[in-house]
């Protein structure tokens, strides 16, 4: 099949000037079986791409037989530069999204071609990491991505048995959408700085999480917004939630609590809302303190736990140097990488919380204490999956797995509230 991979970046916010972007968006909408976007929805999508300086990659198949528009790609992948919090350091990362292949062209290697091109260019730009979220979990390990941050879907019963035992701090104000959007920006930045696993996001993402319908480009009805304010009148937490019509249920769509203790105070407010008997939240921290702050922890149910963020290490030395270490130690790692970006043997020496990484030229498992594939390194990097677990699953081998496990321990679980 003679196909052509094209990459472009949008420069204008005027849809009429951006024909390749509009046809690319059409392909993504088709690929995800989404409804037709309105002009306003497309204009917002375009504006977000301009702000992100996003790369739109598409595979075009010129053999249309006169039956389809060749300007619309048959496979797509979008990417942009962002940052991921790795142990407190905001590390540059290549974010990947909008991965689709038209049903008529699937399983012919188009995703592989797009992904290989995108990762190669990311490595050439010096990106130490790539990141994505998945709709299907079986696809990305083969490209070196490992599940790195988990998130819980929770359901909390907010009837008379809901009671937070810790004394409430500060106060909560219900606010309009505009006020919420104005405050949530700075709160997210604070969250991003403080939270290992967090992926940066822009105002367009805030807007969608606060109820902007991407298809129509208009705010959805039924949203409520609340801000937590500390005793010095500083805003330190925010929640956007949607009231569902049926049975007194509310669904949290965005929950920005840079300090998890403020998250408990926000829940204390939400849990005492009249007429709401159940509240759900999709991206709750796996180490959510709320569960343990409740007088009856049974009102809190984890309905689903999933691998939310996947990381692909491109530069081993950069990522292992960025994170901190709780213990001193030295270990030699042999990293396997089918795509070769990160393959090699590396000596990691941690002292006083800081890691120094040296690449050893002679690459062989014989020279290493531990051998692992690059996806396992992505999983272990910020403590999302423990080294022992990865070893038991068969991804990490060697005589010093226990020492490596001790070296990679982190104080808390990573978290992220950025879908992309
Ligand atoms: C997922 C999707 C993009 C795959 O595209 P594709 O062009 O058919 O993929 P390729 O032919 O390049 O396949 C590359 C590899 O991934 C594997 N693969 C592809 N789709 C897979 C899936 N859904 N589950 C598991 N493995 C998958 C292929 O078997 C192939 O493996 P191999 O190279 O190791 O033999 C496509 O099926 C699609 O658009 N699905 C709907 C949208 C979607 O779910 N996108 C992903 C968002 S996370």
Image (cartoon, helix red, strand yellow):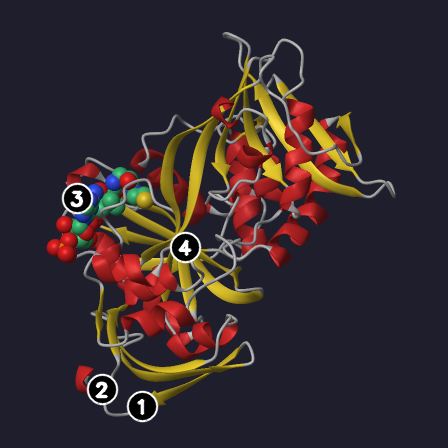
Is residue 231 something that shows in the picture?
yes
**Image spot of residue 10 (x, y percent):** 50, 53
Is disc 4 surrounded by few (<14), some (14 to 19) or many (20+) residues within 10 Å?
Answer: many
Label 4 vs label 3, nearer the camera:
4
Is residue 69 something that shows in the picture?
no
Residue at point 41%, 68% (across, down): 408
Query: Which structural element holds mark 4?
Result: loop
Query: Which structural element holds mark 2?
Result: loop
Label 1 vs label 4, nearer the camera:
4
Real-space Cα distance between discs 1 and 4?
A: 27 Å
Q: Which quarter of the picture shows residue 389? A: bottom left
Label 1 vs label 3, nearer the camera:
1
Q: What residue is pinned by disc 3?
A: 105
Which quadrant is the N terminus positioned in?
A: bottom left
What label does residue 384 carry, if any?
Answer: 4
Which callout, 4 or 3, points at the residue further toward the start of the chain? Answer: 3
Q: What residue is pinned by disc 2?
A: 363
- Mark 1 touches mark 2? (CB < 8 Å): yes
Is disc 2 surrounded by few (<14), some (14 to 19) or many (20+) residues within 10 Å?
Answer: some
Q: Is mark 3 within 8 Å of ligand 1?
A: yes
Real-space Cα distance between discs 1 and 3?
A: 42 Å
Query: Which structural element holds mark 1?
Result: strand
Which callout, 2 or 3, points at the residue further toward the start of the chain? Answer: 3
Which callout, 4 or 2, points at the residue further toward the start of the chain? Answer: 2
């Amino acid at each position: 099949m003679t196909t052509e991979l094209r990459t472009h970046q949008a420069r204008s916010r005027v849809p009429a000037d951006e024909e390749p972007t509009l046809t690319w968006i059409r392909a993504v909408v088709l690929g995800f079986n989404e409804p037709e976007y309105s002009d306003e929805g497309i204009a917002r999508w375009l504006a977000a791409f301009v702000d992100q300086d996003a790369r739109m990659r598409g595979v075009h198949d010129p053999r249309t037989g006169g039956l389809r528009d060749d300007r619309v790609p048959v496979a797509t992948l979008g990417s942009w530069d962002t940052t991921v919090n790795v142990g407190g350091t905001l590390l540059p990362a290549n974010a990947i999204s909008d991965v689709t292949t038209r049903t008529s062209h699937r399983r012919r290697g188009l995703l592989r071609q797009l992904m290989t091109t995108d990762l190669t260019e990311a490595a050439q730009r010096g990106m130490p990491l790539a990141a994505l979220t998945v709709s299907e979990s079986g696809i990305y390990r083969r490209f070196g991505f490992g599940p790195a941050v988990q998130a819980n879907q929770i359901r909390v019963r907010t009837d008379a048995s809901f009671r937070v035992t810790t004394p409430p701090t500060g106060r909560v104000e219900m606010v309009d959408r505009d006020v919420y959007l104005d405050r949530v920006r700075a709160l997210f930045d604070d969250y991003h700085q403080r939270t290992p696993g967090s992926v940066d996001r822009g105002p367009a993402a805030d807007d969608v999480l606060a109820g902007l319908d991407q298809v129509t480009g208009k705010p959805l009805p039924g949203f409520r917004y609340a801000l937590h304010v500390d005793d010095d009148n500083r805003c330190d937490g925010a929640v956007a939630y949607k009231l569902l019509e049926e049975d007194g249920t509310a669904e949290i769509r965005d929950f920005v609590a840079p300090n998890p203790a403020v998250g408990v105070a926000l829940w204390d407010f939400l849990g005492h809302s009249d007429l709401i008997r159940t509240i759900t939240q999709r991206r709750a921290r796996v180490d959510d303190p709320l569960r343990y702050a409740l007088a009856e922890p049974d009102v809190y149910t984890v309905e689903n736990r999933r691998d939310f963020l996947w990381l692909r290490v491109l530069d081993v030395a950069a990522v292992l140097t960025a994170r901190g270490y709780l213990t001193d130690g030295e270990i030699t790692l042999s990293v396997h990488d089918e795509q070769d970006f990160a393959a090699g043997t590396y000596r990691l020496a941690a002292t006083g919380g800081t890691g120094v990484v040296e690449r050893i030229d002679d690459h062989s498992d014989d020279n290493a204490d531990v051998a692992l594939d690059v996806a396992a390194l992505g999983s272990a990097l910020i403590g999302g999956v423990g080294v022992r677990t990865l070893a038991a699953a068969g991804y990490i081998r060697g005589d010093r797995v226990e020492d490596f496990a001790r070296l990679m321990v982190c104080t808390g679980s990573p978290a992220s509230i950025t879908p992309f």
